[in-house]
Each structure stands twice: as C-alpha cells, then as structure tokens.
Amino acid sequence: MDELARFLRAAKQAGASDSFLVELLKQQGWPARTVYEALGAWYAETTGVPMPTPRSTLEAAREAFYHLLAFGTLGGWICAIGSIWFTMIDYWVPDALDRPTKAWALRQVSWQIAAIVVAFPVFVVATRSILGDLSANPDKTASPVRRWLTNIALLITATVFIGDLVAVLAVFLEGELTRRFLAKSLVVLGLAGAVFAYYTRGMGKENALAKTWHTRFAALAATLIVATLVAGFSYTGSPDRQRILAEDRRRSQDINSLARRIYEDYTAWPLVADRKLPADLSALRENSAGRIVRSTDPVTNEPYGYEPEPTGSKYKLCATFGAPSLSGQRPMGRHCFSFDATKAPAYDEFE
C-alpha cells in the first residue's frame, strides 16, 4: 500500500487525472476499490479534511424499509379500491352470464375496506418519513434504492396499462364488449394512471421533492377513498348488520347439515319399507354415528323446528332469522324449509 501511495502522490503532483490513474492501475492488476481508497487518503492528506464517514448498512436498510413499505401499502390500498369498485360495478351493471353470490361479494368488500383503512395511513406515515429524510439529506434523491423501486413501480404500472388495453381490444374483436367490462377497464386505467403520475411527477424526480405534490396526491387519494368507503358501506351495511348476516349464515348451514344428515340416515336403509323419518332432532343426533350435528340456534340455543309429515318422506326444518336473505327469497323471522328425505338437499346456505 505504501508503494501505491507513493506512486499516486508522485503522479498527482505531475498532474495525472484520477480517471487515468484508476484505469492505468486496473490494467496493472490493482482493484479499483483499492485505488480509490488510496486516492481518498491522498486527498485527505492534501486538503487536511478527513474522508466523510460512509452511510452505515443500518441506515441503508432503514431507507429500503420505508421505501418498500410505501411501495407495498400503495399497491395494497390501490388494489383494494379497484376491487371494491369492481364489486359495485357488478352490482350496478348486472350480467346474466356472470352473477356472483352476494354473500361472497359482501365478504370481499369487507376485507377490502379493512385493507384500505389499514394500508392508507401506513402509506402516509411511510411517505412522510421518506420526505423528511430527503429534506434533511437532499443527496438521497438519487438513492439507488429509491430509483430501483421507482422504476419497478413504473414497469408494473406500464404492464397494467398495456394489459388492460390488450384486454379491451381482444374483447372488442370477439364481439363481447359490455358496459360492465368497459367500466372495469376505466377503473384499472384510472388507478394505474394515478400511480404512474405519482411516481413520474413525485417519487421519480431526481431533484428535491415538492411536498405540495405529495400533499395534493394524498388529498385526492383521501377523497377517492372516502367515496369508495361510502359506496362499500352502502353495499355491506354496518358491522351490526354483518353480524346478523353471519348468524343467519350459521343457521342456514345448520339447516343444510341437518337435512343432509336426515337424508343420509333415511337412505341408509336398503329396504324402502324400513325407512322412516326420525321422531325428533335429538334422535337424529343419537343416530349420527358420532358425527354431531347442531340442532339448536347458535345465538338463542333454542332448538330448530322439525315438522315431519305423519307418513312419507317429507318434512320441514324451521329457524328464526334476524334479517331477510340476500337474494330476497327468505323473509326475516321464523321460516320453514321443505325437504324430501329421499333427495339430497339442494338448499343453498346463502339463500
């Protein structure tokens, strides 16, 4: 190292440039990092100013953490908004060929609302931390971590743009372009465009970030989120209503399980003459070969109603529901379902 230091000192005094010395010594087998360290030591000795302390690995990891957190949560609440509007479009623009059950849609919307409520505040906090760090250290605007994540976000957004346009064109060429599909395509283009604008006009800049841009983006995002949450809650209802629907789903599942148990016991007899309905639901439980079937209401613990016909294989199972069914086929209050023990129950637990 002393030999390298003496050579660099003499070469710099003779007017050699740093780039020439690095290339010359690399050709002689010296690692570029070693040459740069020796040049740094020469400059520190010449200027009398010590080399600045490099950023620690912990600081770089912290920067990467906040950028990844902001990137991930942005994708989270953006996708959740899109999912809720997709569900609302399905509700507002029905399609005879695609009718998802409303019970599944309610669960989907509830999860997406929760994702927005959690992800958006975390995104705001992470972004504020990034902006504060950049304000204190303007040189970090050219951070490799930030540039890589920005380019990845732009690549994903561009891919979504292209994929959406290809899908619209393909569906159009197949003659199946519908209002529902167009509406969903516009939602995708709008959300992808917002992310693209955010990274190109904000996070994608090499100079110091203007906080006003981020403030405006957050305000617009908050407005969209409020509108989305209003639409979502108008569809799902309050948590109390969701609780009532969950209790009714459990009652429906119990009725379905009881009917299937009766069917299995009734058809287990090989001779038709030996087949008979159970006298009551408690007898059914005793005959269930160790498989326990709930025969009481999960909330009130009152037994479900059971009304077998005097002869034959037909019977009714009754329960008291807290709300009308999502399909409108079952009213609120006590309701009885008719079954035939010779047939497997086709009762939909969400009806």
Image (spheres, grey):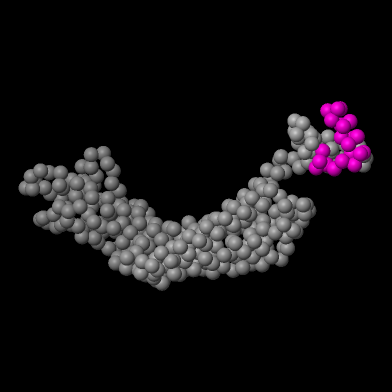
Q: Residue at (59%, 57%) from the top-left corner?
A: 154
Quadrant in the rendering for residue 128: bottom right
Nearest the eye: 170 or 303: 170
Nearest the eye: 309 or 256: 256
Total labels drawn: 0
- Does residue 197 belong to the magenta stretch? no
238 on left or right of 35: left
Residue range in magenta is 1-21
Whether 191 is drawn above or below 11: the answer is below
Whether 279 is drawn above or below 86: the answer is above
Q: Residue at (74%, 58%) from the top-left corner?
A: 207
Q: Is residue 324 visible?
A: no
- Quadrant of the drawing holding the N terminus: top right
Quadrant in the rendering for residue 7: top right
308 on left or right of 298: left
Percent of width and height locating residue 209:
72, 60
Whether 230 is drawn above or below 29: the answer is below
Q: Residue at (70%, 54%) from the top-left corner?
A: 130
Of all residues shown, which one is farthest toward the top? 2
Percent of width and height locating residue 10:
91, 34
Quadrant in the rendering for residue 211: bottom right
- Quadrant of the drawing holding the C terminus: bottom left
- Does residue 8 belong to the magenta stretch? yes
Q: Is residue 270 visible?
A: yes
Nearest the eye: 200 or 187: 200
Percent of width and height locating residue 231:
49, 68
Percent of width and height locating residue 107:
43, 58
Q: Residue at (80%, 42%) from the top-left corner?
A: 19
Q: Main SS of the magenta segment?
A: helix
